[in-house]
Amino acid sequence: VEALFGKGHQLQVHKWLYQEGQFAAKETVTLVGPRSRVISNLRILGPCRTLNQVELAYTDGIALGFDLPLRASANIKGTPGGMLMGPAGFFEMPDGIIRALRHVHMHPADADYYGVKAGDKMRLKIGGPCAISLDELLVRVDPLFKLEVHIDTDEGNACGLKPDTFCELIK
């Protein structure tokens, strides 16, 4: 944060996210890819974590020239790196650029309800005129989690996902 926004800078909350204590920051960065193409206005998620990670949709990776590995969050060993630009400077990431593996956050009570445990895989059935089913949805369980599915924009756009679209989690 300091390399990109200046010494002593603290992330400011733009919008609170569904998971307790998580937020989209007001601050954004620019990512420079291997083809010298950029994506600007990438939103930072806070609070700060112990490692740096950028999650891109598959099509964004192609546009920038990244061969994106599909990974669970924080599994960044052997992943490509890149250059982040902020208003106060640059930050060279040696690794950490991934395509996020689709997953579901669950409280232990939710996991009991669905009969699953951390590390299991589920299916997400998405309704509507372009209905699809997404397999290999990784189950993540933590007492601090609220039930929430994370898919990327490519997956959501492929089926025309809207806030009122019927979805069903299947073991």
Image (cartoon, rainbow, N blue to C red):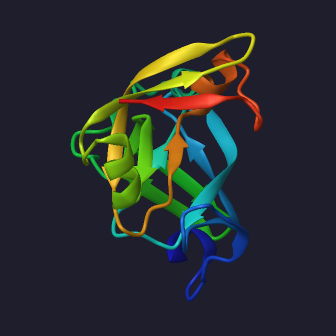
- The answer to whether residue 29 is left or right of residue 135 is right
* Rendered residue at 61%/61% (across/down): 18
| Res. 95 visible in picture | no
Q: Is residue 50 above or below residue 155?
A: below
* Rendered residue at 54%/30% (across/down): 168
Q: Is residue 68 above or below residue 104?
A: above
Q: Position of residue 33 (x, y in %)?
A: 52, 35
Q: Is residue 21 above or below residue 102?
A: below
Q: Position of residue 4 (x, y in %)?
A: 57, 68
Camera-side residue: 28 or 24?
24
User: In the image as oriented, which residue stretches furthest toward the bottom?
Assistant: 8
| Res. 170 visible in picture | yes
> Image quarter for residue 22?
bottom right
- The answer to whether residue 145 is left or right of residue 89 is left
> Image quarter for residue 7?
bottom right
Q: Position of residue 90 (x, y in %)?
A: 53, 61
Camera-side residue: 35 or 73?
73
Q: Position of residue 75 (x, y in %)?
A: 27, 47
* Rendered residue at 30%/32% (across/down): 121
Quarter of the picture holding the C terminus:
top left
* Rendered residue at 76%/38% (across/down): 163
Q: Is residue 107 above or below residue 81?
A: below
Counting every numbered tag in the picture gives: 0
